[in-house]
Image (cartoon, rainbow, N blue to C red):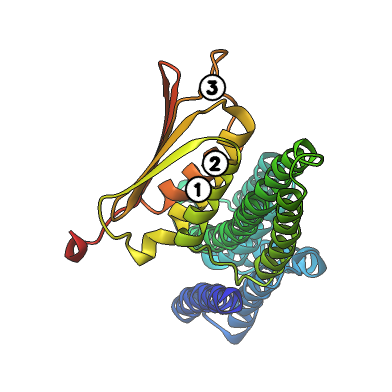
């Protein structure tokens, strides 16, 4: 898809160059046809047009520095000869196009360069006026109107091409930033999923190992069972990590629910599950992630005695009575899940009040599901 976007951008850039070149060529050819009185004048004016088209082509392909001075020298010569020798006002066309491109491509001192070109053009006209013995106002008016109009036309066409080219460049940069942002989001998502897997497992292993240590001299069979579950849990975590690396990980809400019940019961916490409706298959995986993260938080931060889990068609509520008195803990995992859920149009809220802590997540439902 990214290659397709780049191809389209190159086509747009090429189309812009062709349109600008065609417009400049048409205007230049029209000026030559209307103003040239001989083949010598046509040749001189044609040189200015060629210099303009070469500078536009070099600008478009990013190789202006190799031809800029040559094109500018030709345009300056055409203007000088056109005014002083041929008395041709349309000779300003090539200089206006090449001068505009050169000034726009300068990294600095653009204003000084532009003023310098204008001063040179005015100086050539002043020399021409000094060569006239009569009708100075007529010659001045002819150059002030004719040459300025031609120069403004060349400048307008060239500057329009510059604006379109700048928009294409901004579009390319925007797409690159969008691609970089997508990569960053994917890394955050991967880190969040990895935290869900590894963090949950490590806390459960810690809990079960602590329980096994307590029962080591009292109930050896229970110790063996707990260690067997630890071994199975670690193996399952390794498998889930591999699935995550290959983008194949899927959470099973029923399995997560059963796992949460077992963990709470092993920690001496009374757990109750209420099903208000059958969970939508599209919402089950995300609700499983919320349940897993909340279970880990309760085991890590809370001193709960009772946990109530309520499932609806597209939502889950986990309520426990073990909220700490020193304020809510920092729940980074739930914050990450909230961001991911909100991008899909859902909500995730956490509330702490009167020693209770509630986590509620809801995903949007389609109209035909309501």
Residue 176 versus residue 202 in the image, above or below: below
Which residue position holds label 3? 328
In three-dimensional space, the C-alpha distance between marks 3 and 1, rounded to whole angstroms, equals 23 Å
Question: Is there a contact, CB below 8 Å, between mark 3 and mark 1?
Answer: no
Residue for point 59% across, 86% down:
39
- Identify the element where label 1 is drawn: helix
Q: Is residue 74 left or right of residue 121?
A: right
Q: Is residue 222 left or right of residue 125?
A: right
In three-dimensional space, the C-alpha distance between marks 3 and 2, rounded to whole angstroms, equals 20 Å
Residue for point 47% across, 81% down:
33
Seen as rendered, the residue at the extreme front is: 218
Tag 3: Cα neighbours inside 10 Å, few (<14), some, or many (≥20)? some
Q: Position of residue 296 (x, y in %)?
A: 60, 41
Quadrant into which the C terminus falls:
bottom left
Q: Position of residue 64 (x, y in %)?
A: 74, 66
Task: Report if residue 143 is visible in the image.
Answer: no
Question: Is there a contact, CB below 8 Å, between mark 3 and mark 2?
Answer: no
As drawn, the label of residue 61 is none
Q: Is residue 229 left or right of residue 25?
A: right
Question: Is there a contact, CB below 8 Å, between mark 2 and mark 1?
Answer: yes
Which one is nearer the viewer's eye here, 197 or 44?
197
Which residue position holds label 2? 264
- Identify the element where label 2 is drawn: helix
Tag 2: Cα neighbours inside 10 Å, few (<14), some, or many (≥20)? some
- Identify the element where label 3 is drawn: loop
In this rendering, which labeled residue sits more in front, label 3 or label 2?
A: 2
The answer to which of marks 3 and 1 sits earlier in the sequence is: 1
Quadrant into which the N terminus falls:
bottom right
Residue 39 versus residue 222 in the image, above or below: below
Which residue position holds label 1? 261
Residue 349 versus residue 180 in the image, above or below: above
Residue for point 59% across, 50% down:
129
């Amino acid at each position: 898809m990214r290659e397709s976007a780049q191809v389209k951008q190159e086509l747009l850039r090429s189309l812009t160059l062709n349109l600008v070149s065609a417009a400049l060529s048409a205007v230049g050819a029209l000026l030559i046809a209307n103003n040239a009185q001989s083949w010598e004048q046509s040749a001189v004016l044609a040189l200015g047009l060629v210099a303009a088209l070469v500078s536009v082509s070099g600008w478009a392909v990013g190789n202006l520095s190799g031809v800029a001075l040559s094109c500018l020298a030709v345009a300056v010569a055409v203007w000088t000869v056109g005014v002083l020798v041929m008395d041709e006002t349309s000779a300003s066309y090539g200089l206006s196009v090449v001068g505009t491109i050169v000034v726009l491509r300068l990294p600095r001192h653009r204003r000084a360069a532009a003023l310098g070109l204008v001063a040179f053009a005015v100086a050539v006209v002043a020399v021409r006026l000094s060569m006239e013995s009569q009708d100075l106002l007529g010659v001045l008016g002819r150059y002030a109107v004719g040459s300025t109009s031609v120069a403004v036309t060349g400048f307008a066409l060239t500057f329009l091409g510059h604006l379109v080219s700048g928009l294409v460049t901004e579009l390319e940069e925007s797409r690159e930033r969008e691609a970089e942002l997508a990569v960053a989001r994917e890394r955050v998502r991967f880190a969040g999923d990895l935290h869900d897997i590894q963090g949950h497992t490590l806390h459960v292993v810690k809990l079960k190992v602590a329980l096994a240590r307590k029962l080591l001299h009292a109930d050896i069979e229970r110790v063996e069972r707990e260690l067997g579950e630890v071994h199975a849990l670690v193996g399952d975590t390794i498998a889930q990590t591999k699935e995550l690396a290959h983008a194949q990980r899927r959470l099973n809400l029923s399995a997560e629910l059963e796992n949460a019940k077992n963990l709470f019961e092993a920690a001496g916490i009374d757990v109750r599950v209420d099903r208000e409706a059958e969970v939508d298959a599209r919402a089950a995986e995300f609700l499983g992630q919320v349940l897993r993260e909340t279970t880990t938080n309760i085991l890590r931060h809370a001193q709960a005695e009772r946990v109530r889990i309520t499932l609806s068609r597209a939502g889950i509520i986990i309520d426990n009575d073990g909220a700490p008195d020193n304020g809510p803990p920092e729940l980074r995992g739930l914050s990450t899940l909230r961001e991911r859920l909100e991008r899909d149009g859902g909500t995730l809220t956490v509330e702490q009040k009167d020693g209770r802590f509630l986590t509620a997540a809801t995903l949007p439902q389609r109209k035909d599901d309501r």
